[in-house]
Amino acid sequence: MRLTDYFIIAGKDIRRQALRSLLTILALIISTVILVTMAALSIGGRQAITDQFGSSDALTAITVTPSQNSQALSPFGGVQEVNHLTEKLTDQTAESLSKLPHVTSVSARANIWEFHHFAVANSDKQFVAQAQGIGSDAPLKLAAGTLFESNDQKNVVILGAAYVSQLGGTPSSYIGKQIQITTQKGYRGEGASIPPAAASKQISDTFNQTVTTLSATIIGVTDKGPDQSSLFIPMGWAHAIRTSQYNEGADIKKIDQLASDGYTAIRLSVDDTANVKSVSSALQAQGYGQISTLAQVEQLQQFSTTMWVILGAVAAIAIVAAALGVANTMLMTVSEQRYMVGVWRAVGARKKMVTRLFLIQASLLGMIGGAIGVGLSFVTTFYVNMYVSSLLTSQGLALTNIAQIPWWLAGGALLITIVFATLAGLYPAYRAANVDPSAALNSTQ
């Protein structure tokens, strides 16, 4: 008998038991969708980690904070206890850290709490202003544009790559564009209209509920990585923004909050990823808090691996359950076709032929269920990515597809489904091949 004849006979048997075959194929479809979707989430999650942290340059970065309590922060959020005994981070601190072994560069960073949100010209989208002041020598990797010429530059910004992803277009197309930055209410930094010293309570109250709009020009766009969700301004302008002004008679009193509080963090660059842990240990010994990009990536990858094991176990259970359904269907088929098998055996059909026929029928069920399941998995991951993208966009964030199906996953899932279905058909095929012809023919009398 030719191989095509086996498939023709198996196909006829499947059509003859339409409802039972449909239910079995449905179970295989569901299990395949679960398997592919779970694997796609794991693969996409790992790729998202790679895209988020960018090149190996980002993996050598360490963020130094004033207190070791800041280490309570994790990639998934957390809390930070206030330590009143913590020494603030200053230029002297940065200079001392630059002398540590294996440290190649040091740059201070200061959060700009005075900014609330911003919008790029000719765009109706607004983003929460996660702004930071940085020095002109900060090792910021750009996709387009230039770094700050000096710390004293004002009204210029470097835009994070995540904002460009949400706005659309290329990074270079945003160079030279204007952005409008809206401050918090009651802003008293540079550019604010401070009420006079003799202002009435009503005027003061109105000012405390008023925002200020500042204009700036985009001179650079960051590359993808840890800095892609920030808006950067020169450190000199950051001092001016964070300097509160008060009219006191003919004089203006100024309080530089940035100088008073110190820098939010100091970013270190290490010469090699192999030396990141030793530098982290040295920082911890000196009492500083430190957040290593490499450590965060390792934590995220461990989390991704754990999730893959859990999701893989769920997918395996689904596949095994579907295989049991195939075994049950094939056993019922053998029982119903006992007389026909007896006729085959009586006219000279060998056991191998009978075994091959029922195995091909089982594998055909797996092939149909697996193929449809893989196809539906592409639809499922499309809607998962669309939902996640919509959710992150509403939060002003950007991320690559969280679920990805490479060609080897699609082919592997189909192969696994066929193999499990074929294995499930081994026992029914064995029983069919060992049917006693005389008993089978007499059983209908």
Image (cartoon, helix red, strand yellow):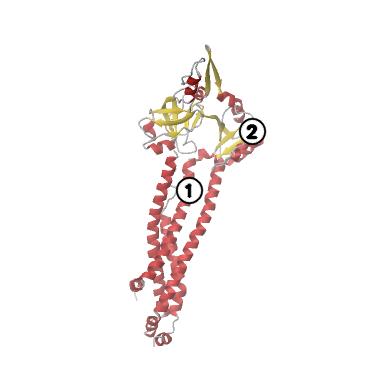
In this rendering, the label closer to the viewer, 1 or 2: 2
Question: x, y percentage for residue 34?
Answer: 45, 58
Classify residue 286 as left or right of residue 439: right
- Residue 319 in view, yes or no: yes
Q: Residues within 10 Å of mark 2 (few under 14, many from 20)?
A: few
- Secondary structure category for the residue under label 1: helix
Kindly identify the residue that appears in the image at 52 percent across and 50 percent down.
Answer: 304
Quote the CA–CA distance across marks 1 and 2. Answer: 35 Å
Question: x, y percentage for residue 344?
Answer: 37, 82
Residue that protrudes farthest toward the top in the picture: 250
Classify residue 299 as left or right of residue 368: right
Q: Quadrant of the C terminus?
A: bottom left
Q: Quadrant of the N terminus?
A: bottom left
Identify which residue, 262 or 125, lies in the foreground: 125
Residue type indicated by callout 1: Gly
Earlier residue among tags 1 and 2: 1
Kindly identify the residue that appears in the image at 45 percent across and 48 percent down.
Answer: 402
Classify residue 346 as left or right of residue 236: left
Residue type indicated by callout 2: Asn
Question: x, y percentage for residue 357?
Answer: 39, 74
When the figure is inspected, residue 222 is found, relative to residue 28, above or below; the finding is above
Kindly identify which numbered label has been placed on residue 45.
1
Pointer 2: what residue? 83
